[in-house]
Image: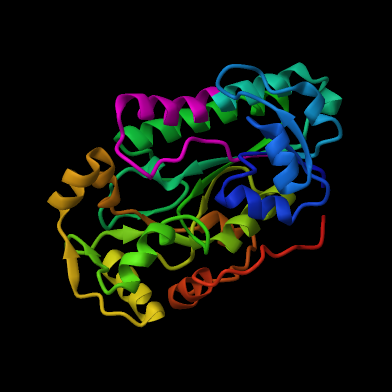
Amino acid sequence: MKALVTGATGFVGRRLVATLEGPVVLSRDADKARTSLRVASFAWQPEREVAPVAAFDGVDVVFNLLGEPVAGGRWTAERKARIRQSRVAGTQNLVRALEALPPTRRPQALICASAVGFYGDRGDEVLDESSLAGEGFLADVCRQWEEAALGAERLGVRVVRARVGLVLGPDGGPLAPMRRPFELGLGGRLGDGWQWMPWIHVDDVVGLLRHAALSNCVRGAMNVVGPAPAQNRDFTRALGRALHRPTILVVPRLALKLAFGELGDVAMQSLRVQPRVARESGYTFRHPGLDEAIADALVRHPAPREVPA
């Protein structure tokens, strides 16, 4: 399996690239990507231009992980525009490159990242891949993002829309900003803590992306979440246990709203998402339990290599 990866220098992208044999990456800074990842790299400005057709030579599968980070600060109008454009316009320009290829040279599959934000705030409702889109900015972005990816289907390319949850790992995701306050004994639940958090270990994100690429039976939406979603209060306790710290504090909803604006509201959303497609297509989770997944995610270790397909 020869793969092309966008978003290769990101949290998930770096670990995915480490499991692939001779991948090609598209990056805004091709020289930096080539040096840091030690792979073939092509320069690409995803919002402004069609992806370079030469990069797809011999490629069997495309992993599209590009996107402006959602967390990390207030959502100004400018930042929200970048979040949307990097995903929607970027994916449209990726599909335009596939369209420019002769049919015999097109990849067999496009595995396009999306997010569980597609479902919006849904309380205790159990959500699987058949559930409808929700409301709000993130839900709207995810819907448009997925629609852009679906443009590859009319070109004969199998498309998987990978709706990724909260990714747990040692060098990114929600644990990175949470770890220090919890280590200082300042960690606590968000609001009443009853909201559902669809977590997944980064190893299983990579595993599911590869599984989707290699399984012809997988197409359409696929929830990239662990098999046991946890409520925020249970997640908080599990993180406290892993760090041997108390978790008696409470972060009020109003405090999140004042600190982060609209992003604070997103942190309080409840998403009880289930990985039905992963289960039915035979994927085996490496980290199915929350306590073990958090403990492993807190340990800094090299990204695992897998036998190339």
Residue 293 included in the magenta stretch of the image: no
The magenta stretch spans residue 78 = yes
Q: Is residue 11 above or below residue 157?
A: below
Q: Indicate the position of residue 72 as horizontal and vertical percent values.
A: 37, 44
Which one is in front, 309 or 14? 14
| Residue 111 visible within the image | no
Report the front residue among 147 and 297: 297
Q: Quadrant of the C terminus?
A: bottom right
Picture coordinates of residue 281, whole percent (x, y): 63, 58
In the depicted structure, whether residue 20 falls above or below residue 62: below
Count of all numbered marks drawn on residues in the image = 0
Horizontal relation, residue 143 to residue 178: left or right: right
Residue 42, image x, y percentages: 74, 30
Q: Residue 249, how many percent across, how many down?
A: 18, 70
- What sort of colour scheme is used for the picture? rainbow
Name the foreground residue: 208 vs 69.
Answer: 69
The answer to which quarter of the image holds residue 160 is top right
x 36%, y 66%: residue:
180
- 139 with respect to 154 (left or right): left
User: Could you tell me which residue is drawn at 51 percent across and 33 percent down?
Assistant: 146
**Magenta part of the chain:** 62-89
Residue sitting at x 62%, y 68%: 284
Residue 289 visible at all: yes
Placement of 240 over or under 268, stated as above or below: below
- Decide: is 8 above or below 21: above
